[in-house]
Image (cartoon, rainbow, N blue to C red):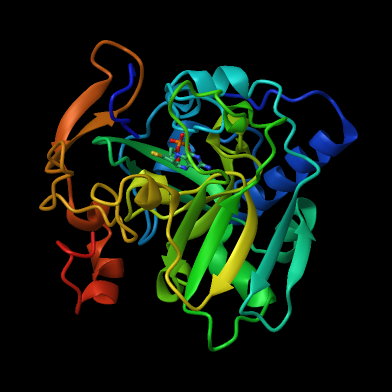
Amino acid sequence: MLIKNTKNHPNYNCPETEVMSEQAYLNRRSFLKASSLAIAGASVSSYAEKASQYSTDEKLTSEYTVTHYNNFYEFALGKEGPAKLAENFQPLPWQVAIEGEVEKPIVLNFEDILKATTGLERIYRLRCVEAWSMVIPWQGFELRELLKLARPTSKAKYVMFETLYDPKRFPGQKRGALGFFSLDWPYVEGLRMDEAMHPLTILATGVFGKSLPGQNGAPLRLVVPWKYGFKSIKSIAKIKLVENQPINTWQKSAPNEYGFYANVNPKVSHPRWSQARERRIYDESLFGTKRIDTQMFNGYGDLVADMYRDMDLTRQF
Ligand code: MTE
């Protein structure tokens, strides 16, 4: 995310504790279940072979770049800060509350969430509102599976997500930690119910077949591939089903620049730059990026455009 007026290993770096090894085990187990690749350490080419309606076979961004070029303000403002500051991040124990317009409010431990859902693997394009993009192999499960456990009522029209508020674990949440810049913590995001129940919408618990590193949103984060990256909220602790459209963090911070929907749209410019093209990042090398045209709904239009058929996407951006 670009901010106004500011100057603006790959492996999970965890101590050998019981808890962490269980997380790694569960994550690995759901990954293997999803990919039916009964091999240790699936190679990059094994990801790339599995194109489907939901997974692309485009060239992947390198694992190093995906885990070292991040936006995660709960750690730092710059792209390299999150990986450094999250090095010793301890995601477990972790709980997620599902509440609001549901018949059965629940609080689940991370391990129970993995046990209650079906592991899958998806290779998605991630298009940031800042006009860069990556291709990333995520492991996780469909959000709708988790939501159904709480039995949403007919009043549930939207889903609101919150990142954990814990300045001890997320130093960027400390007052003054980001200089004169600050966001209203916790980071909040939202989806309309049909978007949340869409099979493309996943909660990721792993990337490149390994537990999600802190900087990518451990232990679980949203991935909504047809929307700008800021919708993919990290390190989720609360999911609330609500009647009215929630106001997300970036919308609150700059309502003329960031909307609720944030569907990738090459025809609707950001007030300060065009969204017609993007810089696809493959790796950190000199020729590791390529300029390409941005696709409507980030190339997922066949699967999602119907949800917006009666809307003016220039106004509801
Ligand atoms: N979630 C939280 N809680 N805090 C953040 O700062 N940044 C968003 C999104 N999720 C962010 C967040 C933005 S702007 C982007 S582009 C993606 O995370 C980046 O995800 P990545 O670092 O895994 O590529």
Circle count:
0
Which residue corresponds to the image point at 33% horizontal and 21% vertical from the top-left?
6
User: Visible in this render: residue 67?
Assistant: yes
Residue found at the very far right of the displayed protein:
18
User: Visible in this render: residue 140?
Assistant: no
Which residue corresponds to the image point at 42% horizontal and 23% vertical from the top-left?
79
Answer above or below: position of 130 versus 265. above
Along the viewing direction, whichever of 257 and 107 lies nearer the viewer: 257
Residue 272: % across, % down: 16, 36
Kindly indicate the quadrant of the structure image that contains residue 1: top left
Residue found at the very far bottom of the displayed protein:
154
Which residue corresponds to the image point at 42% horizontal and 26% vertical from the top-left?
62
Answer above or below: position of 255 versus 4. below
Residue 89: % across, % down: 70, 28
Along the viewing direction, whichever of 265 and 56 lies nearer the viewer: 265
Left or right, residue 154 beside residue 249:
right
Along the viewing direction, whichever of 142 and 186 lies nearer the viewer: 186
Which residue corresponds to the image point at 29% horizontal and 75% vertical from the top-left?
307
Answer above or below: position of 291 versus 201. above
Left or right, residue 112 beside residue 233:
right
Residue 107: % across, % down: 77, 63
The quarter of the image holding the C terminus is bottom left
Left or right, residue 29 beside residue 217:
right
Residue found at the very far top of the displayed protein:
286
Residue 4: % across, % down: 28, 30
